Image (spheres, helix red, strand yellow):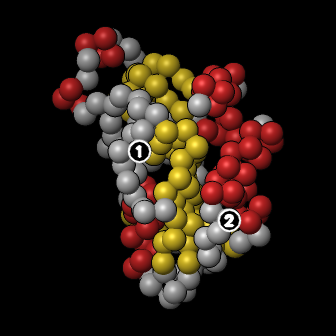
Amino acid sequence: MKNYLEIFRNTGALLDGHFVLTSGRHSALYFQCAKVMQYPEHLLNFSKNIMDHFLDTSIDTVISPAVGGIVIGTEVGRRMNKKTIFAERENGEMTLRRGFSVEKGEKFLVVEDVITTGGSVKEVMSLIESFGGIVVGVGVIVDRSNGKVILHENQFSIVPLEVKSYNEDEIPESLKKILIQKPGSRSLK
């Protein structure tokens, strides 16, 4: 795992500061996976790890939540030779746009870059199931909960580690002194 953290640090993808995460929680660390995914060798490495885990799983389609999961999801789908789509927010709700659809009985692998609470992945899973699709697995690059957030029985993360995050009312004084950044893809109210 240390090697993976070094990759994130060396590519400028592991940031220190005071961040409001997509989940709304506060943290002193932020994983900006887009910065590491810009390097083909890392994109290939991370996508191969996820693909290898799910090789024996029957999958029709790979789906990712926009925006963070799109790059890794697309590469996993390409390597597995599977159709690849993404879900995105419209008026605050996760939805399918751009002509994407889910067929009844279609088997989906959900791929995401980082989870803290798993909120975006849960929304994508619910969306798939609302159309009669079947979620057969969840693949993640970084699981900030260190395996505490269980989204699916067939769940895999490359980098499981515990990164402290805080609700608004429990932010430590040392973190309160740092200017807040909101780098996530979901706009917060």
Disc 2 target residue = 55
Q: Position of residue 131 (x, y in %)?
A: 44, 83
Residue 173 lies in what quarter of the image? Answer: top left
Label 1, secondary structure: give it.
loop
Looking at this view, name the residue that lies furthest to the left.
Answer: 169
Q: Is residue 15 visible?
A: yes
Where is the N terminus found, in terms of image quarters? Answer: top right
Residue at 49% x, 57% y: name it.
Answer: 155
Residue 99: percent from the left, percent from the top?
A: 62, 78
What residue appears at the point 50 percent right and 19 percent down from the top-left corner? Answer: 16
Residue type, mark 1 in image: Gly
Give whichever of 169, 82 is nearer the camera: 82
Question: On screen, 170 above or below 152?
Answer: above
Q: What residue is at 30 percent from the left and 16 percent from the top?
A: 176
Residue density around tag 1, few if under 14, some if 14–19, many if 20 or more, within 10 Å: some
Residue 83, image x and y in percent?
69, 73
Q: Is residue 91 visible?
A: no
Question: Where residue 9 sits in the image (x, y, percent)?
Answer: 63, 22
Which residue was labeled with disc 1? 147
Q: Which residue in the rendered view is the most extreme toward the right?
A: 40
Q: Are marks 2 and 1 in contact (CB under 8 Å)?
A: no
Residue at the image point whose x is 29% and y is 30% from the top = 166
How far apart marks 2 and 1 lie (CA) works out to 21 Å
Viewed as shown, does residue 67 lie left or right of 90? Answer: right
Q: Is residue 189 left or right of residue 87?
A: left
Q: Residues within 10 Å of mark 2 (few under 14, many from 20)?
A: few
Q: In the displayed structure, does residue 59 sit left or right of residue 143?
A: right
